[in-house]
Amino acid sequence: MRALIHHRFGPAEDVLSVEERPLPEPGPGQVRLRILLSPIHNHDIWTIRGTYGFVPDLPAASGTEAVGIVDALGEGVDSLAVGQRVATGGTFGVWAEYVVANAAGLIPVPEALPDESAAQLISMPFSAISLLEFLEVSEGDWIVQNAANGAVGRMLAQLAAARGVHVLGLVRRSAGVDELRAQGIENVVATDQDDWREQAAALTAGAAIRAGVDSVGGESSGHVLSLLAENGTLVAFGAMDSPIMQIASGDVIFKQATVKGFWGSKVSQTMDAATRGALFGELIQRVGDGTLTLPVAGVFDAADVADAVRSGDTPGRVGKVLLRF
């Protein structure tokens, strides 16, 4: 079978190549999947660079999320059937024609859901809906997030709106406001405007903002914290701009603010089965009714992975880049 492999850490477009690998056989409790489509995520790129929390042994496989067809069943698997379409978001090495995965972690995909949506159903959307749960907000509450025009930011806004939670979005450039408005997402301000704080206050009509999500780091962390109400919670979700959060001690002290981190894989590991099932059910419903959109920026053959990675770096890109196997 074909698989994308790297023998050293570095930029994915430089170190990944298609190699022939033995067809894997499923063990007890496992199934073999024939991979259809797989998205390129930031954490995949960071893993290939050797800079992520998980560092694989070399030579290493790649990719973590995909939609595929069950091709073979291991001993004791009776919950899935050969030919069934499933999604996986926690199987390392899915950038290959075939991969072995634990049956218990696979999500059956409804027939009405297209491959392009199913391929990206778990990692980013499930992170977004898990983050929304993590914030512990209710209908009518306000939250604020930076990187509002990023993939998770856009999904969080859509999922929150479906629950009746109001989201104030921060973006770094004015064009981002128009981009989100075109996707039906309102209540967004650009921090490159001198009066962005006044705009934010007008949009929220002075309502208390209970929680904030920081995906950027640097001074943007402080921007989010400064907008929170007393006893608000600032959640560190990412660090696109800087690994250092620049926050004012006065805001932490006088707002009695809580600052904590969110790592999706850890939250998922401790989530009970009932909650997980309910959240996946909600995701599938939201994608099915169009409330949650999962756009695709392009689909590339695995042999063209370098072009795919470069396409993913295109400024202003909307949607995921997918690999076809």
Image: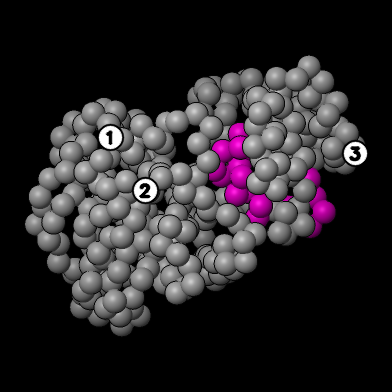
Q: Is residue 88 above or below residue 5?
A: below
SS of the residue under disc 1:
helix
User: Disc 2 to disc 1, how far (Cα)?
Assistant: 12 Å
Q: Quadrant of the C terminus?
A: bottom left
Please give the range of residues in magenta. Answer: 136-159
Residue ID at (27%, 48%): 301
In percent of width and height, residue 28 lies at 21, 73
In percent of width and height, residue 255 lies at 80, 31
- Residue under numbered circle 3: 205
Q: Around disc 3, counting alpha carbons within 10 Å, would you say few (fewer than 14), some (14 to 19), or many (20 or more)?
A: few
Colouring mode (rainbow / by chain / secondary structure / one colour) = one colour
- Residue under numbered circle 1: 306
User: Disc 1 to disc 3, how far (Cα)?
Assistant: 47 Å
Q: Earlier in the sequence, mark 3 or mark 2?
A: 3
SS of the residue under disc 2:
strand
Q: Earlier in the sequence, mark 1 or mark 3?
A: 3
